[in-house]
Image (cartoon, coloured by chain):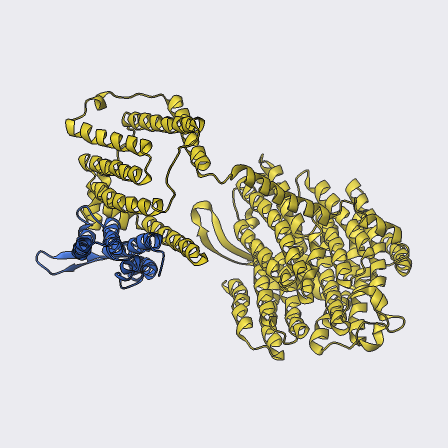
Amino acid sequence: MLGLVMAMGAVFVAVPAALLLPGRRWRGLLLATVPAGVFAYFVSLLDRAADGQPLTWSVEWFPSLGVELAFRADGLALLFALLIAGVGTFILVYAEAYLGGKPGAGRLEAMLLAFMGAMLGVVLADDAVTLFVAWELTSVTSFLLISFEQEKLKARKAAVQALLVTGAGGLALLAGLVVLGQAAGTYRISEMGAEAVAGSSLATGALVLVLLGAFTKSAQVPFHFWLPGAMAAPTPVSAYLHSATMVKAGVYLLARLHPVLGGLEGWRPAVVSVGAATLVVGAFVAVHERDLKRLLAYTTVGALGFLTMLVGLGTALAIKAAMVFVVGHALYKGALFMAAGAVDHGTGTRMVDELGGLRRAMPWTFAAAAAGCIGLAGFGPVLAFIGKEAALEAGLEDGGAAAGWALAAIIVSGALFAAAAVVVLRPFFGAERAPGHPHEGSAGLLAGPLVLGALSFGLALAPGAIEGRLIAPAAAAVAGEPVKVSLKLWHGFNTALGLSALSVGVGIVLGFGVPRVTAATGRLIGARWFPSGPKVYDWLYYGMQRLARFHTVWVQRGYLRGYIGAVLLTFVVLAWAALLRWGVSIERDWLTPAFYEAAVAATVIVGATTAIVHMSRLAAVTALGAVGFGVAILYALFGAPDLALTQIVMETLTVMLFVLVFYRLPKLVERGPVRRRLRDGAVALAVGVTMTVLVLASLGHREGAPISAYFGEAAYAEAFGRNVVNVILVDFRSLDTLGEVVVLGTAAFGVFALLRVRRWSR
Amino acid sequence: MNSSILRTMARLLASLLLLASLYLLWRGHNAPGGGFSGGIMAAAAFVLMAVAFEPMAGWRATRISPLVLIPLGLGVALGSGLIGIVTGGEFLAGRWVTVDVGEGVKVGTPLLFDIGVYLVVIGVALAVIIPLMGEEE
């Protein structure tokens, strides 16, 4: 049972190892054994999941809230977990070769491993809160990975952008999961009932919030722009996070919650339309890109839209298609990204127009890229093709309006993807052209793309290896009922094949015409007024900063009397609102004080008056000291010797402190305009009156038994002390005291530093 | 300030204040006093030294720099809390031993905690007040 946790734990344990191991060639291989082992372990769990008895593990986390640390390895979870561990294995080898002994390679591998662990947590989590925590962890690690080359402004900006978009979505998701948990009556995802959720008034809210979380993470329109921006990351990161794993987390979430939310009225139109729009936009923009990685990023956006759309359709056939395509896409896109990185590594550029004839100098990279491009085009004996055909069949079979739109989107984007594939392959043909001397990558650079590319073919030719053990349990978990899966590469001549052939054919022709055919549309997208994602993001981002600046200038004027006035007047208003709301009743017995009480009160009044009237600051401070000592005597008179003692020593130090500060101030010559003095006087009077009334009123408002009796008894019985105040401070509430002294100490260092800086700057 | 009367008296008074502050600290659990008021009284003793002689005299009179006293005190308070954990209870749980003097005196981790507070308060008060007094090192 503990195996699931140990598998994730092993990945996290490898993080410090990556940081500590020396930067040799074998480090990547050694680290890769961890995800490889985890992969093998997950393979061994497949049969249990297929039998409908997935491995689970849980432990109480916040029992009072019904939150657990719970994991469950069902078919869907295992499908994604195998992708994460499997692709991750090759990525680690590739990363070592890609950075080739540069400093920071270990850091990159460590962060990749941390991300891998977080991602495994997302897909294996069976508790909504556990899922959310892992989800946020992937956002944070992905921020670190995108900003890996932190000295570059572009990388930092892209990282912040990705973090803000996915982080905002994460907040929506947290709210959505909590609402969902409330509606379903449980946070265990596997125990959530569709009927309970559908019958709740919270259902729509939960759906909207969860969709926001999933759409931002999976780069759906209109949040898609962060993903191409994230290409500022080193290629291993792009290949891993932005093709195979992290961006698929949103799709995973949709698939995971499909049994719970899929029946709701809004699900199908919302998810299908957003997915279809993303598919077309991604594919359309991809054709206009000249940078290999950005081009691939946009096709990834499109593929994510494709998957979202399929999960939105939600028929058994569509779900089956989605599950096949998830695997197929990870294989071909991983291969393509890594091949693009190898091109960058071997020639020094990724711009399509600067490259040509690379197939002679880089034959193996060419092979991997070609294999990937067949997947991208979606036509040929590759796994992605099987997924796409199934999707077309699902669209044809369904016949609804949503399915019609989906079909149109698949056909249009199919052509554009094929065109993009032609663009990607062009650097390998024609006359040899490159900025540097092109050379083939090392074995470490080639192993990943070649193996993934080969698997893309192999699994398509022998789909029996995965259909029963992997795809069927995953599809069943998404559909919420058993799904019969039999995958075939060749379905005979049917409508789906015809549509596919047509769109790919048009696309290939189009691809040869790029960039001439795309010149006009390219100008349109690039136009200043065109509301592209990054522009809207920048507008919001800088608008927020402007708003903050305006707000700060308006509220934070920098006058101490302004702040004090605001605080005091707020207090007066709130206090009177409460007093009037609940009524004031004041007893009269305070009107007849004992003579010594009256004497102390008189001292305090005289001290306060002197402090106001006197023109010498030192005299005013001394008079304030008299007020303080008067108050201390009052404490003593009314049975609070501890307070009195502290007040006396404190007052002594405060007076000294004031004297020391005022000693340096210039002489007070005038008190400012009469208007301001009247205003300040009014505020002071209002506060004084309010406080007096409040104290007197509270005397008549004793409700409930005072707690002093309890403390009086417990202090000696439980803490062996007769001084109740002290016992509370150092025993009953010692954690509070500890917090207070920490604050005091920190503040003291701040004050000390400020005072020293002043002296040094002189 | 240049007054030999003040200087002579300051040494005596400061010693007495320190003694009184330790007494306050010790008796705090059963009578008015404790780490906070004790700490302020001790700080007052050092400030008196600083006023009578020169600011750095008050700073140096603590032997351990006030800037070190703050983390030291926090460490003592934290340590007293950890004792609770080490002995199988919760963080900051009180632990007591009876010292066999006279009728038997109970000494426990709350006293240790109070000593930590005492040290922090001395450090904080001096770190804020003495730099305000002095122009030079």
Residue drawn 63% across and 61% down? A147
Between residues B66 and A365, which one lies in front from this camera angle?
A: B66
Where residue A463 sits: x, y (%)? 75, 64
Q: Is residue B109 left or right of residue A87?
A: left
Q: In this view, does A567 lie to the left or right of A131?
A: left
Name the quadrant containing residue A531.
top right
Where residue A705 sits: x, y (%)? 26, 33
Chain in blue colour: B
Between residues A6 and A212, which one lies in front from this camera angle?
A: A212
Give the residue furthest to the left.
B102
Where residue A633 sits: x, y (%)? 20, 37
Tell me the shade of chain A.
Answer: yellow
Where residue A44 sits: x, y (%)? 59, 67
Q: Is residue B117 left or right of residue A88?
A: left
Decide: is A609 above or below A268.
above
Evaluate whether residue A51 shows in this view: no
Evaluate whether residue A360 shows in this view: yes
Query: How many numbered discs, if any?
Result: 0
User: In what quadrant of the picture does the C terminus of chain A appear?
Assistant: bottom left
Decide: is B20 above or below A151.
above
Between residues A574 and A16, which one lies in front from this camera angle?
A: A574
Q: In this view, does A277 lie to the left or right of A230?
A: right
Between residues A205 and A555, which one lies in front from this camera angle?
A: A555
